[in-house]
Each structure stands twice: as structure tokens, then as C-alpha cells.
Amino acid sequence: MKKIGFVDYYISEWHANNYPAWMKDACEKLGYEFEVAYAWAEIDKSPVDGVTTDEWCEKNGVQKCDCIEELCEKSDMIVVLAPSNPETHLRYAEKVLKYGKRTYIDKTFAPDYATAAKIFEAGKAGNAPFFSTSALRYADELEYYGTLSDVKSVIITGPGGSFEEYIIHQVEMLVKICQKKPVKCKVETVGLTSEGTVMYEDGTRAKLIYSPRYPFTVYADDGVESGEQKPVVSGYFTTLMEEILKFFETGDLPFDSQQTLDCMKIREALIYGHDHDGEWVEL
């Protein structure tokens, strides 16, 4: 049985609370032998529910590690979580990736493009294969648009607790659908709704519409044949778990890592634009 270690800012949070069971289900489906065996968290008590690392570990049958180094030495594969605290990822990655073990880094990968580039440098220095993504990249609905020969426009909507934290989901979907060179973006906000526009080198335009209660939907067309707007309702977290475990098993990256850097560049510009309403931001 191969051992997975969880690194987190605080361990009792939505992702860490669900991933062990989902990974177990994925292992049963794929015929793999992995288990979440170790955990380390920087903060002992979760600000979400007050659960301590010891309590979480006892509930999940996981061994608590006293430091990241202990976890890295004991684990075969590593998952860096802290999904709501991407500002911690560089600190964690610099310690984790030097062990050269296959690593998954949860969304949001980094707080900005410069930090993302430093994490990639750490991975290269440690010869550590890793990847990062939003689960929404694995929504089945996105496959529908893979049949378009040349995407010309994209519209994606989505909800979340804040623009800064949740816009990554829409950006990940956009980068998967529209693999072109973005050149500039802007954000315009009315009330609780923020509409981001991403312009591409060839004139393709994308709209990312965020509002706290909007559902996730996706639409794209090639300027000739119109598709249909699709609600994103598929089991994307199930697929994500399978992709993480396939990567742990084979070492093969599921997509070009440059897409992660593209996501970080677009996200950073959108967040800046969100604070500078209507101003175009060059990428």
C-alpha cells in the first residue's frame, strides 16, 4: 500500500475532510493501492469548525506528523492542500518538492504569477513531478466544446464566497477550452456581479461572470456553429481524484503545466481589474 501525506494550513477543511473517502473510492474503481496515511497542519485548530489535527487524524485513521519533513520522509506521494490559503503554497512547496516525490498542489495554486513561477523553480530543482488544478477543469461538460475547430467566444458563469478565491474555477475552465494566447483583460462590477472580459491575440473574447449565487455554466462557439449553454453538474471531483491517483501511479502529467502558469497570469490580472473597475490590464 502506497502512503499519501496531506500538508495543510489547518487540516479540518472541506477538501481534506472529503478527499480520503473519495480517494478510497477512486482506488477501488481503478484497482490502485493508495491510502491517506499521514497529515501535518501548520495551525492545530481549524478556524472553520474548531477540530484539532489530532481529532481529525483519529477520525480518519491517519498518523499526525510533527513537521513537514517527517511527513515527506514517510510518504510516497504528497498532497499540498490549503485551498483557501494559496499564500502558504510556496513555503510548503519549497520544503516538499526537494524530496522529489510526486505531488499534487490544490487550487488555488499560488497567489500570483511570480509566486507560481517560484514553485515551478522549486519543482525543477527537486526534480519533483507535480501538478495543480481546480476540480472544475474535469467537468464533463467541457468535453462538448472540444469538438469545436476554433473557439471564438466563451461565456462562463460561477458562484463562490469571494471573487478572489473562486474566480480560479472559471479561469481553469477557460484555459482548458481556449488554449490561445491571452493579451488583456478587464473587470466591470455591478452590485454583487462582476463580469471579467479576457481578450486573446486572435480576437477571441471570453466572458467570466461571477456572482455569489450564480450556478456554474459554460458556453462556447466557433463563430459559425453555436453550441448550447450547459450547466456544470457532472461529478468533477470524482474525476479529479482519479486523475490525481493516475498521476501518482504513473508519473504522467494530465496536461501541459504551462496551462497552470497561464491560469495564474489571467487570475492575477482579473483580481487587479476587480479593484480597478473597467480598466484594461495587459497580460
Image (cartoon, rainbow, N blue to C red):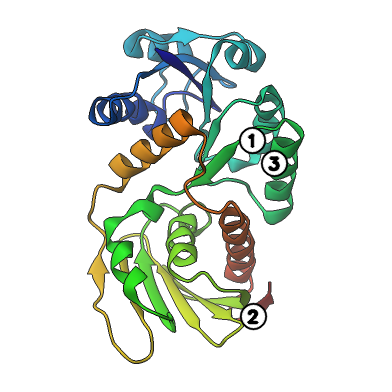
Q: Residue at x 35, y 24 (%)?
A: 20
**Quarter containing the N terminus:** top left
Residue type at mark 1: give it.
Answer: Thr
Q: Does residue 212 appear in the picture of this structure? A: yes
> x and y percent of residue 18 in the render?
32, 30
N-terminal of the pair, mark 3 or mark 2, is 3
Structural crowding at the residue carrying mark 3, measured as other residues with C-alpha within 10 Å and reported as few (<14), some (14–19) or many (≥20)? many
- In the rendered image, the quadrant that contains the C terminus is bottom right
- Where residue 130 sits, quadrant-wise, is top right
**97 or 29, nearer to the observer:** 29
Left or right: residue 208 compared with residue 115: left
Residue type at the position of mark 2: Glu
Choose between 65 and 44: the one closer to the eye: 65
On screen, residue 227 versus residue 178, left or right, reads left
Query: Callout 2: few (<14), some (14-19), or many (20+) C-alpha neighbours within 10 Å?
Result: some
Q: Give the residue at mark 1.
A: 88
Q: Secondary structure at mark 1?
A: helix
Q: Residue at x 38, y 25 (%)?
A: 49
Residue 29 image position (x, y, % from top left): 23, 30
Marks 3 and 1: which is nearer the front?
3
Q: SS at mark 2?
A: loop
The image's mark for residue 279 is 2
Q: Nearer the viewer, mark 1 or mark 2?
A: 1
Sequence order check: which comes first, mark 1 or mark 2?
Answer: 1
Q: Amino acid at mark 3?
A: Ile
When the figure is inspected, residue 199 is found, relative to residue 214, above or below; the finding is below
Q: Which residue is tagged 3?
A: 119
Out of 193 and 10, give the one closest to the viewer. 10
Mark-to-mark CA distance, 3 and 1: 11 Å
- Whether residue 135 is situated above or below residue 45 in the rendered picture: below
